[in-house]
Image: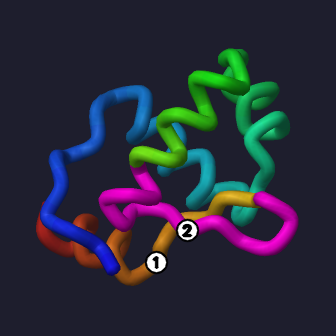
């Protein structure tokens, strides 16, 4: 369940936008597409998961939690 966590920083917003565009994706795939280290992507995805912006799917893929993402987009 989403919590009222902090607004994502720039790097986290890039991850959210990439997940929104690509759909569920693994950490290595996301790291490749963003030219970033997988450990950095993993850490940011876990943080976004804790605050309810993303969820982990089958096969370890991350995806945007549509309910939270749509609520944020409507409020901006």
Query: Where residue 4 sits in the image (x, y, percent)?
Result: 14, 64
Question: Within 10 Å of the Cα at label 2, are there few (<14), some (14-19), or many (20+) other Cα atoms?
Answer: many
| Image depth: mark 2 or mark 1 in front | 2
Q: Residue at x 29, y 73 (%)?
A: 2
Residue 8 versus residue 43 in the image, above or below: below
Residue span colored magenta: 48-60
Disc tally is 2
Query: Quarter of the image holding residue 34?
Result: top right
Question: Within 10 Å of the Cα at label 1, are there few (<14), some (14-19), or many (20+) other Cα atoms?
Answer: some
Residue 22 versus residue 31 in the image, above or below: below
SS category of the residue bearing label 2: strand
Residue 26 versus residue 29 in the image, above or below: below
Foreground of the two, 5 or 69: 5
As drawn, the label of residue 55 is: 2
Query: Quarter of the image holding residue 25?
Result: bottom right
Q: Is residue 43 left or right of residue 32?
A: left
- The quadrant the N terminus occupies is bottom left
Q: Residue at x 53, y 45 (%)?
A: 45
Cα distance in 3D space between marks 2 and 1: 9 Å
Q: Residue at x 72, y 56 (%)?
A: 22
The residue wearing badge 1 is 66
């Amino acid at each position: 369940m989403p919590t009222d966590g902090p607004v994502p920083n720039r790097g986290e917003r890039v991850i959210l936008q990439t997940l929104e565009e690509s759909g569920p994706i693994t950490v290595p795939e996301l790291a490749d597409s963003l030219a970033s280290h997988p450990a950095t992507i993993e850490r940011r995805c876990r943080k976004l998961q804790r605050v309810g912006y993303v969820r982990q799917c089958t096969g370890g893929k991350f995806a945007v939690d549509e309910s939270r993402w749509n609520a944020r987009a409507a409020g901006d």
